[in-house]
Image (cartoon, rainbow, N blue to C red):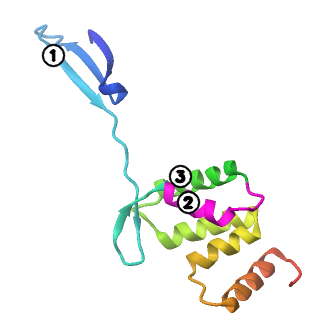
Amino acid sequence: MVDSRSADDGAAVRRRRSCGGCGYRFTTFERFELRVVHVRKRSGQRVPFERRKITAGLVAATKGRPVDRDDVERIAEEIEALAGRAEPLMSTEEIGRAVLERLRQHDHVSYLRFASVYKGFDDAEDFARELRLLEADEGLEPA
């Protein structure tokens, strides 16, 4: 190798090389390849994973609650990493359950808010049922 430098604003590495046998000089470009993570929706459609959607859902669920923005970002990061490790892809149901598991550890009201959208609550009984399940799982006294 003769020379190596950054190219395309850091998206590639340009290398000047020479053949050991004949001395011919040439240039190679090495580009970084990012793995695109996909999510399987309930309809069966595959879409690219978008962390901003997770963050937006978490921000809405935690609005006015004692959950730090850093916690929201950390949860979104964890979900993104989880989706990146899923083979061949992760379903929206799995993502929703993972978000709920993490919200349960931070704030029960935020958990119920997120669950109401994720699980499509239709009436107050849906909230009451979910609250009973949450209380049973956490070993809490019923309200």
Question: x, y percentage for residue 108?
Answer: 76, 70
| Residues at discs 1 and 3 in contact (Cβ within 8 Å) | no
Q: Is residue 84 left or right of residue 129?
A: left
- Secondary structure state at the residue bearing disc 3: helix
Q: Is residue 28 above or below residue 3?
A: below
Residue linked to disc 3? 81
| Residues at discs 2 and 3 in contact (Cβ within 8 Å) | no
- Residue 134 falls within the magenta-colored stretch: no
| Residues at discs 1 and 2 in contact (Cβ within 8 Å) | no
Q: Badge 3, how many Cα within 10 Å: few under 14, some, many 20+?
A: few
Question: x, y percentage for residue 84?
Answer: 47, 54
Residue linked to disc 1? 26
Q: Quadrant of residue 121?
A: bottom right
Is the stretch drawn in magenta largely helix, strand or loop? helix
Residue at the spot 53% in from the left edge and 70% down from the top edge: 94
Type of amino acid at the residue the image marks with label 3: Ala
The image quadrant where one finds the N terminus is top left
Type of amino acid at the residue the image marks with label 2: Ala
Q: Is residue 72 above or below residue 116?
A: above
- Residue 61 falls within the magenta-colored stretch: yes
Query: How many numbered circles are shown?
Result: 3
Q: Which residues are magenta?
A: 52-67
Residue at the spot 86% in from the left edge and 84% down from the top edge: 142
Sequence-wise, which precedes: disc 1 or disc 3?
1
Q: Quadrant of residue 133?
A: bottom right
Q: In this rendered view, identify the residue nearer to me: 96 or 65.
A: 65
Q: Quadrant of residue 120?
A: bottom right
Which tag is nearer the camera, tag 1 or tag 2? Answer: 2
Residue 56: mark in rendering: 2
Type of amino acid at the residue the image marks with label 1: Phe
